[in-house]
Amino acid sequence: MASESKKTVLAALFANLAIAAAKTVAGLLGGSAAMLAEAAHSFADTMNQVFLLVSLSLSDREPDEDHPFGYGKERFFWALLAAVFIFVSGALFSLWQGVHGLLSGETVEGGYLLTYAVLVFALVAEGTSWWRAAHQVRSEAAAAGKPVRVYVQQSNDPTVKTVLFEDSAAVAGVLLAYIAYRLGRDTKGLLIGEAARPEQREALRRTILAHPEVEAVLELLTMYLGPVSLLVAVRLDLRDGLSSQQVEAVSTRIEAELAEVVPEVTQVFLDPTPRERHRQKAEAPTS
């Protein structure tokens, strides 16, 4: 998945660089200040892909003593920076350029043919990048057995989502401010510790309760550590009279089954806690 995401980001990076170069040449040859400003905008767009490439590289690092759960959330942090950059360099820049043009009464200098040629080239380049991102999303949605729209809404991989949304905005003319808002909102939730989806939590709970040794699930906590890395922590009340060997055996089975029910599960912590002690702890005053 990370390899495919890297290819998608590189495709978007090269597309934006090519568009920026074409706009620069057209602006210099045609003497268009507006086209040169657009070139600066396109160069700024490439920074989004740089952020995403950095996130892919940093998130691949193995867990260590300082980060025992790995570096998966690097993907979320750098995707959030990309969302902010889209808003500043895209939405605000476009707004400023439009207002400035209206207030100054600036007319477009010559070079119409060259300008339209650059626009066509930009459409082809952005369209190619968008097709790559859309192809990856369709493939992953098919593998997950979900409709594309549902998969995109539920996906915890901000890397491809950023490329797909940004290119969609460029090709279809969607407001970049809205795209930046959606990306920022989704990534913020993951960055501060988003839980598994309700249907995933219910599936985990059913799997645990299916074991006759388990009397009750007292608390089920989940958090995404990366796009495909889910932590699960469970406090459960076990049947009285179980030996230590039986507790170890049922814990091992539960851990293996949770990863089968929800493939993203990578970390499982089970805490056998008597129901009465859990109730007392929950009712104890906090200072």
Image (cartoon, grey):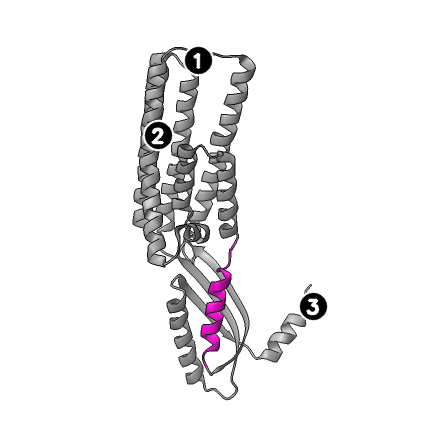
Rendering coords of residue 176 (x, y %): 48, 34
Q: Are marks 1 and 3 in contact (CB under 8 Å)?
A: no
Disc 2 residue type (three-letter): Leu
Q: Which of marks 1 and 3 is in front?
A: 1
Q: Distance between the residues labelled 2 and 1?
A: 21 Å
Q: Earlier in the sequence, mark 1 or mark 3?
A: 1
Identify the secondary structure beneath mark 1.
Answer: loop
Is 32 one of the magenta-colored residues? Answer: no
Q: Do the residues labelled 2 and 1 touch (CB within 8 Å)?
A: no
Q: Which of 37 and 268 is in front in this view?
A: 37
Identify the secondary structure beneath mark 2.
Answer: helix
Q: Distance between the residues labelled 2 and 3?
A: 62 Å
Rendering coords of residue 58 (x, y %): 37, 47
Disc 1 residue type (three-letter): Val
Residue 280 seen from this side: yes
Residue that numbered label 3 is attached to: 285
Residue that numbered label 1 is attached to: 108
Residue at 42% x, 74% y: name it.
Answer: 254
Residue at 32% x, 32% y: name it.
Answer: 125
Q: Distance between the residues labelled 1 and 3?
A: 70 Å
Q: Which of 198 and 283 is in front in this view?
A: 198
Residue 66 vertical placement versus 57 (above, below): below
Give the magenta-colored segment's residue range. Answer: 192-211
Residue at 63% x, 75% y: name it.
Answer: 279
Q: Which of 26 and 232 is in front in this view?
A: 26
**Mark carried by residue 123:** 2
Quadrant occupied by the C terminus: bottom right
Q: Earlier in the sequence, mark 2 or mark 1?
A: 1
Describe residue 175's horizontal placement relative to residue 133 as left or right. Answer: right
Rendering coords of residue 67 (x, y %): 43, 56
The prevailing secondary structure element of the residues shown in magenta is helix
Is 196 one of the magenta-colored residues? Answer: yes
